[in-house]
Image: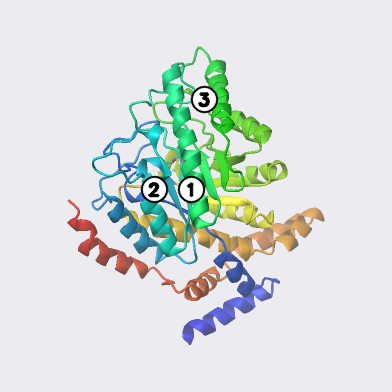
Amino acid sequence: MAAYSSYAVARERYARLGVDTDHAIERLLGVPLSLHCWQGDDVRGFEGKSSLDGGIQATGNYPGAARTPEELMADIDFALARIPGRHRLNLHASYAVVEEDECVDRDRLEPRHFRKWVDFAKARGLGIDFNPTLFAHPMTRGMTLSSPDESVREFWIRHCIACLRISEYFARELGTPCHMNIWIPDGLKDIPADRLYPRARLLDSLDRIFAAGYDKNLVHVSLEPKVFGIGLESYTVGSAEFYIGYVLTRGLIPLMDNGHYHPTEQVADKISSMLLFSDKIALHITRAVRWDSDHVVRFDDEVRDIANEIVRCDALDRVLCGLDFFDASINRVAAWILGMRNFQKALLYALLTPHERLAELQNSGRFTELMVLQEELKTLPLGEIWAEFCRRAKVEPTEKWLDDVIKYENEVLLLRK
Ligand code: RNT
Ligand code: ZN
């Protein structure tokens, strides 16, 4: 009763600005986010490899990382039960579930190696999104799809084509299109002697992958650029300009990861431009602390700005949102729950913003009023609306979900030695 009346007061406060909180909650309940499986085990996957490469790193040695498909699935279940709404699962090819007596390299992966994931998703009503894995593999020799070595390039082309088939399988089985994103680690530590030909080879490799054909109604393909990685500081083959040019000329989807740009560049500013040229865009929501460090997503200005842009462009159904971070220094299940809830909170904040009114102030040059109202919005009772959203989604509204995580850590995660 007490909780309900505090919601009523908050609802009234927003209503005075012309914002309908019930409508905002309803809309947010229908927004699926893609939960990245790789936070559960520090991007290790099930191929028995323990170290990352390709310029990305998971740092920390908090106990309890999932070691098997069963453990990872149990952890995902635990996290999803504490995240409001219905979501999707984002898998990497390195999470194939291969029988012990079978040895399958990445270029020979088949849909059947993901049957366990399909069963898992079906039973829970989840869609699956997918990523070929072009890092942490003996054939990743600094370069993959842009390699000067034909056999390396062909290996990864075969891998990506295999992943298109697996994505089609996910979509068919689960009755929802699969978003397949390609990110490659290709780059150079020091000053390049040739920037052009690696990019020309990447272009050719991509054309060869898509020439294999796939059902565009079932698979939505995106490409993810990057500015640099650790050990690849001087040159990234798959840069922003390269992929913008590629996706726009091929009818594919641009993906922007907010850790992949120069520090003062803001993905929030890029969204409206990309939406004017592409029917759909995709995002990796992450937190870059000084570099693409993939810290857990917080409810901060950057993330709120991104959410605001999606909502005020009226593009909730045109932007495919997935999370992308891997923090091995804290409880991994808590990292998932917190990151997902934080991005949802940012979307709620955006849905509770009177965008038309603010735009009107901008358009009529009333910048003083605009600034005052923008500042006022920051301290409205968002927490009460958030709590009501969680209650309607039947999950714990407050930080009390952490009590369950601590219990799970003691009873399950700490037994994993
Ligand atoms: C790396 C990219 C990429 C990866 C995942 C694991 O910088 O952000 O999206 O994080 O594919
Ligand atoms: Zn990413």
Residue at image location 24% in from the left, 53% down from the top: 64
Instruction: Give percent across and percent down for residue 417.
Output: 17, 51
Image coordinates for residue 106, horizontal then vertical, percent: 38, 34
Q: Of marks 2 and 1, which one's residue comes earlier in the chain?
A: 2
Mark 1 Cα shell of 10 Å, populated few (<14), some (14-19), many (≥20)? many
Camera-side residue of 232 and 114 = 114
* Closer to viewer: mark 3 or mark 1: 1
Q: For the residue marked with disc 2, what is the amino acid? A: Phe
Q: Which one is nearer the viewer's eye here, 52 or 113?
A: 113
Pick whichever, 78 or 99, lies toward us.
99
Name the element at disc 3: loop
Which residue is labeled 2 in the image? Answer: 114
Query: Where ligand 1 lies, by image quadrant?
Result: top left
Q: Secondary structure at mark 1?
A: helix
Spot occupied by residue 91 in the image (x, y as percentages of width and height): 42, 47
When the figure is inspected, residue 181 is found, relative to residue 368, above or below; the finding is: above
Query: Residue 323 placed where, x, y %?
Result: 47, 50
User: How many numbered callouts?
Assistant: 3
Whether residues under marks 2 and 1 lie with C-beta atoms below 8 angstroms apart, the answer is yes
Q: Residues within 10 Å of mark 3 (few under 14, many from 20)?
A: many
Dot label at residue 237: 3
Which mark lies nearer to you, 3 or 2? 2
Residue drawn where x is 78% and y is 57% of the image:
366
**Please, what secondary structure does the residue beneath circle 2 have?**
helix
In this picture, residue 407 sits left or right of residue 176 = left
